[in-house]
Image (tube, rainbow, N blue to C red):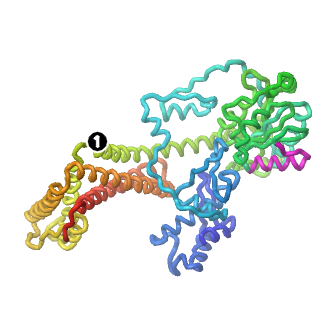
Amino acid sequence: AVDRIVATLAADDATIERERHVTLTDRGYDRVETSLRRCGLLKPHQFLHDIGAVTLLHHVTQALRAHRLLQRDRDYIVQDRAIVIVDKLSGRLMPGRRYDEGLHQALEAKEGCPIEEETGTLAAITFQTFFGLYDRISGMTGTASADAREYHQVYDLDVVAIPTHRPVIRSDAEVMHPTRDAKLRAIRDAVSAAHRRGQPVLIGAPSIETSEQLAAMLEADGWTRSDTPSERSFAVLNARHHADEARIIARAGRPSAVTIATAMAGRGTDIRLGGADTDARDRVVAAGGLLVIGSEHYDLRRLDDQLRGRSGRQGDPGQTVFHASLEDDLFRDMPLDTMTMNAPIPPAIARRLIEAAQRRNEMRFFNDRLGLMRFDATIQRQRETIYALRREIRDDPDPTRFVDRFRNEVIDEMIRHFAPAPARWDISGLDDAIRRILTLAVPLDDIPPDDVGVAMLRTRIATMADQWMARKAAAIDPETLGTILRRVMLALIDQFWTEQTERLEHLKRIVRDRRLPPHQIAAEFEIEAFATFETLRSDLRSAVTSHAMRLGLLQPA
């Protein structure tokens, strides 16, 4: 029902912000709430932001993201009635990967696929924190220079450029068009001209959707889509046809070959000019080498560099031309006026527009990663604490000492909570907690509500609990008891940490949505994450104590 309601919203019922967040407008909220009340999901006088509707608001938000932010054939494809995510940087399919927090289910509802249960996250760590676990790190890539600042700031690594084995003689050019239609016509004409002179062409597309649009444009111009080379034929390499990648790339350098590819095209492989035929290589070299046509600039400069790097390798001749238009996604947030959109764009101005848009995106992605690092610094402290406790319990020859420690801490917490001051004793609540967690019936009515009574409370509860555990130790083989208690504690730690991992992911999203300054977001997250961690530790102690007290022997409470 939520998906149907969100699917019927008008364009101005929600707004997409620069950070790629989508939110309902006031009118959108009114329409959604009215529809939810009509179908019985929201009570007559209830609103989406009420505490009792938090889960419903979450479903609405995820459905909104599925419809407004994620595009089929760009961010995911539908394969065998299942949603398969497309990696944004490589263009490759990621079978088995699922969006979290109900977003994948929202996509399944949007596309009419069977809705599967949400998978849980057992543990999580950012790449930056994971790499930080190593004593030394290094790496090699052809596009590191574009992100040299981030490598230095995040990893304290300098980027060193190694000269190429042979001089790069490739020529690079850019053409800016006022409209998308003008750009597509220019690409079509450039492909035809290169084909006539025997020059192979690789057209880079930012998404599956764009690659299919380019293919349809060539077919409308009389070209034939075929994996087998023939006159005026072309091949398409995207996530839908990834199984043919090696064969398509092997032919992409032959004379007059035309290949449309997403970002996945031949990454890490050379497109051999002429293929394996020496005579064909000579013809391709004479025609100018491989012509790479960028159908659109990527959000990041290094992705442009990766596409350019398909041509002119190992000293071969080559050409690259990026065709862009002011209607491209790269410029969607740029304040362009009508005059700019309809007038010819000088190369210098075009270059500045492209650089400004890519710098803005690079800074946004960089800040996003820094934000993740700040979040994970807080999570890492919790992770290290939990993992250290887990290792201690796993390796200690006598795990019963942890059970004893947890039990005493639970008793202290009970007394602090139910007997904080003489005038605020809650003997009934304390008795209920003792029966529920310790499974004991402890006489409490004769203890006076004063400071001496607090000590008597603690002594009496602890003594009876110790005696009950001593009876277990006497009745069960010590090694068997230790093994059982160790397994119980490790299982509970894993369960509680899994729940905490999901809780922290949810908390990240909540804190981000508060629209606070970056430094304040991290501080807010740290404060609230600490509170949830203290709750986890208390709940873990209670759970271990409760399991241990119920183990083996039955005690009537």
Q: Is residue 219 above or below residue 65?
A: above
Magenta residues span 209-226
At horizontal 48% and vertical 39% (from top left) the residue drawn is 128
Magenta-drawn stretch contains 224: yes
Magenta-drawn stretch contains 499: no
Answer with left or right where residue 470 lies relative to residue 221: left
Q: Quadrant of the N terminus?
A: bottom right
**Can residue 48 be seen from the camera position used here?**
yes
**Can residue 402 be seen from the camera position used here?**
no
At horizontal 53% and vertical 67% (from top left) the residue drawn is 57
Q: Is residue 213 above or below residue 117?
A: above
Q: Position of residue 247 (x, y in %)?
A: 75, 36
Q: Position of residue 426 (x, y in %)?
A: 19, 71
In which quarter of the view is residue 407 placed?
Answer: bottom left
At horizontal 61% and vertical 76% (from top left) the residue drawn is 35
Q: Secondary structure at mark 1?
A: helix
Q: Is residue 167 above or below residue 479?
A: above
Q: Position of residue 104 (x, y in %)?
A: 58, 58
Q: Quadrant of the C terminus?
A: bottom left
Q: Position of residue 442 (x, y in %)?
A: 14, 68
The number of numbered discs placed on residues in the rendered structure image is 1
Question: Please, which residue is most extreme toward the top here?
Answer: 166
Q: Mark 1 — residue? A: 395
At horizontal 77% and vertical 23% (from top left) the residue drawn is 316
Three-letter code for the amino acid on which mark 1 is drawn: Asp
